[in-house]
Image: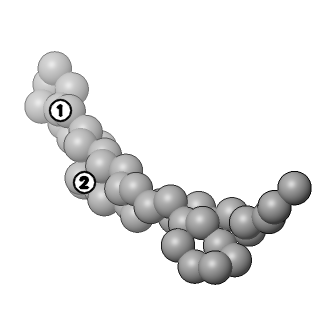
Amino acid sequence: MTEDTLVYTNVLVYSPVASPDGVVRMDEAVIPIECQYERFVF
């Protein structure tokens, strides 16, 4: 957090499961997410 901005961070983890025949269509992925909000005072 800064004087003007509030920052939220998180990580999205995708872990695919194999289909019944053993096929995995995608590798595991880790995606960082960051949201920034300007702070203001009423």
- Extreme-front residue of the structure: 42
Q: Which residue is mark 2?
A: 27
Identify residue type, mark 2: Asp
Report the colour scheme.
one colour
Identify residue type, mark 1: Ala
Q: Residues within 10 Å of mark 1 (few under 14, many from 20)?
A: few
* Residue at 17% in and 32% down: 18
Between 33 and 8, the one nearer to me in the picture? 8
Residue 39 lies left or right of residue 29; in this view the side is right
Q: Which residue is mark 1?
A: 18
Between 9 and 42, the one nearer to me in the picture? 42
Residue 14 lies left or right of residue 3; in this view the side is left
Residue 9 lies left or right of residue 19; in this view the side is right
Can residue 23 be seen here? The reply is yes
* Residue 11 x %, y %: 36, 56
- Say what secondary structure mark 2 lies in: loop
- Say what secondary structure mark 1 lies in: loop
* Residue 36 x %, y %: 63, 66
- Extreme-top residue of the structure: 20
Q: CA distance from mark 1 to mark 2?
A: 11 Å
| In the image, residue 16 above or below residue 38 | above
* Residue 12 x %, y %: 37, 50
Reading the chain from its start, which is encountered first: label 1 or label 2? 1
- Extreme-bottom residue of the structure: 3
* Residue at 74% in and 68% down: 38
* Residue 37 x %, y %: 69, 63
* Residue at 69% in and 77% down: 4
